[in-house]
Structures are given as structure tokens and as C-alpha cells.
Image: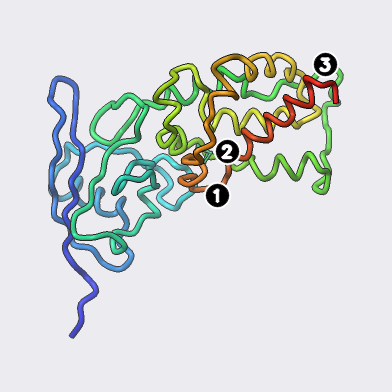
Amino acid sequence: MTTTTRTVTLRIFRWSSGEAERSQAYRVTVGPDTTVLDALVDIQRGEDSTLAFRYACRVGMCGSCAMVVDGRERWACRTRLQSFGDRVDVRPLYHFPVLRDLAVDMTPFVERLRAVGAAMTPADDAPSYARMPADAPARREIDAAIECIGCGMCVSACTMVAHHPRFPGPAALNRALTLQLDARDGARDDRWAALLSDDALWRCHGQGNCTDVCPMGLAPTASIIRLRQLATRRLFGR
Ligand code: SF4
């Protein structure tokens, strides 16, 4: 008789205030559909209640279970353990302060959004209700970049975020594109000033790590290239 279960060892990053970092191994029984999140919940409920991690929806919508599994940013609730070997490393996202174990402080993510003025600012003369037809060219471009769930995986995967603390990073620049294309937004000139500063658009090296890991299939790299095109046209008054 064949069995569809096997044992996998999760080597999980552990740290809490006042302790030294360490890796702790847990053996878990894995079925065909066991996700990393399932395993973490089992460990926390049955073996080690001190293990800290974050999750909410459990169905691949909220992005709060983002972490680095086997060297790559992934959402734990959609990552099946059967596709890995017998030993899997799990660690928190890079480029965020660790709060405890796998839980990180997302404040820098919000600060990066704020740095590019990532909130919609209605223009003074904007109508209270402004319909943007689904087939409008700007709407089509915006739609391709709008579904960001704020998981932070792209920021973790971005090498330039590590080198330049003031670089807004892929998610913030992706968000900025959606606003720069939106004629209803009244803060586009101010946003250009931020985007064209030394530490923003030009810092991206186009490696595409952000696009590789985005669980929503967004392409922040393409958004950054598009912003550069718009910026160039603006400089030449076109
Ligand atoms: S762009 Fe993608 S990877 Fe980056 S925060 Fe948004 S959903 Fe996550």
C-alpha cells in the first residue's frame, strides 16, 4: 500500500527579545495538501505554543502569512510542503524588523508608501463621483497593477531595498504608478518630485526579483519602467 504522507523537518528561525537567534527543528507529518501554514499551526497548537507567526485569512487573500520558505518569499497558506524535500527552512521576511520568530514589523512598508504619497488625493475640481470606463487606456494600465495586498514579499526580495534605506521599493512604486495614471488625483506633481529624487525611480536595477515573488502576479518591475517612461515624457513636455 502506498502512503501519501511523509515526515518533513521544518527548520524555523527563532528569535525573541533578549534571546540569541537560533534555528529550531520540528518534525511534521505532511499529506498531499499540507501547507506551511498548516504545519506551523500544528506545531504551535501541539508542540510549542511559543512559536510566533502571523496569519489571518488562510486562503491566499490577505498576504499576512508572507515569509521566506526554502530561500524564497512565499505565502505560507498557499505553499504545499509536498513540493519540497525532507528539510525545509522557514524564516521571516528580509528587510523588516523581526518582532518575534516569523512575525515582522510592517511599519517600514507603510513608511515607504507614505514616502511616495501613496494615498489618493482627489483634485480640487474632481467630481464627487467620477466613473472611469473599464476600457479606458489608463484604467486598463491601472487595473494591471491595482491588486496589491500589501504582503511585503516584493520588498523582502528586493536587493536595492537592502542597499538604499530611502528607496521606496517595488510595492510603493507600483502603487505610485496607479495614482500617476489617474487623472482624478490632484497630487501628481508633488508625487513626481518624490519619484524623481535621487533615491526613488532611478535606484531600481530592474532585476525583477519583486515580480518573481509577487503572489498576486503583479509586475512592479514593469510599473517602474512605465513610471520612467512617463517621467521622461513629462521632462520633454509630451
Ligand atoms: S506588489 Fe505583490 S509582492 Fe509586493 S506587496 Fe503587493 S502583492 Fe505583495
Q: Amino acid at mark 2?
A: Thr
150 with respect to 230 (left or right): left
- Which numbered mark, 1 or 3, is in the foreground of this view? 1
Q: How many marks?
A: 3
- Which numbered mark, 2 or 1, is in the foreground of this view? 2
Q: Nearer the viewer, residue 29 or 207?
A: 207
N-terminal label among 1 and 3: 3
Measured as percent of width and height from the top left, residue 97 is found at 32, 24
Q: Amino acid at mark 3?
A: Asp
Q: Amino acid at mark 1?
A: Gly
**Residue at left 44%, top 19%?**
164
Q: Secondary structure at mark 2?
A: helix
> Which residue is disc 1 drawn over?
217
Quadrant of the rendering where the C terminus is positioned: top right
> Which residue is disc 3 drawn over?
124
Quadrant of the rendering where the N terminus is positioned: bottom left
Specify the quadrant of the image occupied by residue 121.
top right
Q: Secondary structure at mark 3?
A: loop
55 with respect to 88 (left or right): right
Residue 134: numbered disc:
none
N-terminal label among 3 and 2: 3
**Residue at left 49%, top 39%?**
210
**Residue at left 41%, top 22%?**
163
**Residue at left 46%, top 41%?**
209
Measured as percent of width and height from the top left, residue 56 is found at 40, 43
Q: Nearer the viewer, residue 35 or 22?
A: 22
Give me the C-alpha separation between circle 2 and circle 1: 12 Å
* Label 1 CB-ligand 1 distance < 8 A: no
> Which residue is disc 2 drawn over?
221
Measured as percent of width and height from the top left, residue 172 is found at 56, 28
Give me the C-alpha separation between circle 1 and circle 3: 34 Å
Q: Nearer the viewer, residue 32 or 191?
A: 191
